[in-house]
Image (spheres, rainbow, N blue to C red):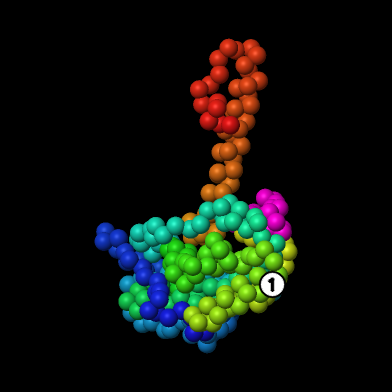
């Protein structure tokens, strides 16, 4: 997979000077899991995502996550490396603002990047830091893996660089989730043509199994987006539960954004409730909290 040109973006892993490298010892696993990991490693080697590495100061372990089809998703335990790396402060969009920006539109296309993070290359000098050990050898990533601390910020920065003139106009972007929005079907065809030309120019690929084009409603970051402004804040419980069980929530930028949105909603509800309680008490008390008008 070609991916983005390294002149546009590469993922770097700066380290805090006081942090020392950590080499994790190979963990024991069941034989059937080991074979499934081998299958996944071979798949990623063939795709050009991995290379073998002999000497590396940093070595992590694989955390196999079962999939519905019986295979495993190969996650890497980068907790030691993430703790040693400073946070990239490039901002992610506020999800509630992003969703509200589609309020006046009637036609949508929902898109998802194909192996989105893997379309960005690792900086040459930082590849060995992504090394992980298996029963079949030690490998490193040539592309940006999902589990790295600042992967979401790097991806969002790349999207802003490539689509800055289209964001908040024809499209909205949250990491590897993208929505094209238009007022009419004719406008939508024009907007999609412009978007596809941009995607082709920079060799960005979409996942056809996770895309829906020219629809009047759909899911946007857990919200049901309908034509001309209707949105439903309800989300699938199973998805939320799965995310809630994650041990390293800070590595999931989408989850972080949703957490921030929920905090905002709870705070607003609390402030409004407090204001109404103060009004109810006014009949008994001739004193109203000074912050009451601001709450309304």
| Above or below: residue 227 compared with residue 9 | above
98 or 260: nearer the viewer:
98
Residue 50 belongs to the span the image colors magenta: no
Question: What count of labels does the image hold?
Answer: 1
| Above or below: residue 101 compared with residue 11 | above
The structure residue drawn at horizontal position 52% and vertical position 87%, both measured from the top left corner, is 46
The magenta segment is 224-243
Name the image quarter holding the C terminus. top right
Q: Is residue 82 left or right of residue 245?
A: left
Residue 227 belongs to the span the image colors magenta: yes
Furthest residue in direction left, as rendered:
17
| Image position, residue 22 (x, y; %) | 35, 66
Q: Badge 1 is on which residue?
A: 186
82 or 23: nearer the viewer:
82
The structure residue drawn at horizontal position 48% and vertical position 58%, both measured from the top left corner, is 92
| Image position, residue 105 (x, y; %) | 66, 60
| Above or below: residue 108 compared with residue 69 | above
| Image position, residue 137 (x, y; %) | 45, 81
- When asked about the image quadrant of residue 102, the answer is bottom right
């Amino acid at each position: 997979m070609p991916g983005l040109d390294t002149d546009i973006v590469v993922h770097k892993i700066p380290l805090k000077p006081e942090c020392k490298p950590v080499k994790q010892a190979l963990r024991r696993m069941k034989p059937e899991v080991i074979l499934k990991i081998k299958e996944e490693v071979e798949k990623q080697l063939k795709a050009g995502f991995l290379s073998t590495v002999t000497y590396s100061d940093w070595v992590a372990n694989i955390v196999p996550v079962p999939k519905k089809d019986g295979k495993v998703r190969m996650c890497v335990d980068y907790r030691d490396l993430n703790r040693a790396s400073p946070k990239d402060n490039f901002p992610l969009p506020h999800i509630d603002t992003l969703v509200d920006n589609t309020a006046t539109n009637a036609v949508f296309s929902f898109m998802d990047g194909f192996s989105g993070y893997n379309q960005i290359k690792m900086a040459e000098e930082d590849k060995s830091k992504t090394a992980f050990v298996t029963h079949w050898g030690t490998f490193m990533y040539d592309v940006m893996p999902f589990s790295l601390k600042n992967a979401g910020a790097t991806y969002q920065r790349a999207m802003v660089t490539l689509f800055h003139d289209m964001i908040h106009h024809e499209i909205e972007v949250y990491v590897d989730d993208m929505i094209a929005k238009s007022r009419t079907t004719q406008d939508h065809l024009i907007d999609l043509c412009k978007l596809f030309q941009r995607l082709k120019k920079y060799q960005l690929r979409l996942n056809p199994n996770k895309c829906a084009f020219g629809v009047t409603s759909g899911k946007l970051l857990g919200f049901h987006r309908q034509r001309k402004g209707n949105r439903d804040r309800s989300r699938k419980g199973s998805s939320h539960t799965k995310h809630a069980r994650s041990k390293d929530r800070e590595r999931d930028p989408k989850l972080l954004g949703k957490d921030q949105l929920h905090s905002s909603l709870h705070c607003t509800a609390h402030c409004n409730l407090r204001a109404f309680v103060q009004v109810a008490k006014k009949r008994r008390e001739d004193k109203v909290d000074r912050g009451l008008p601001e709450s309304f």
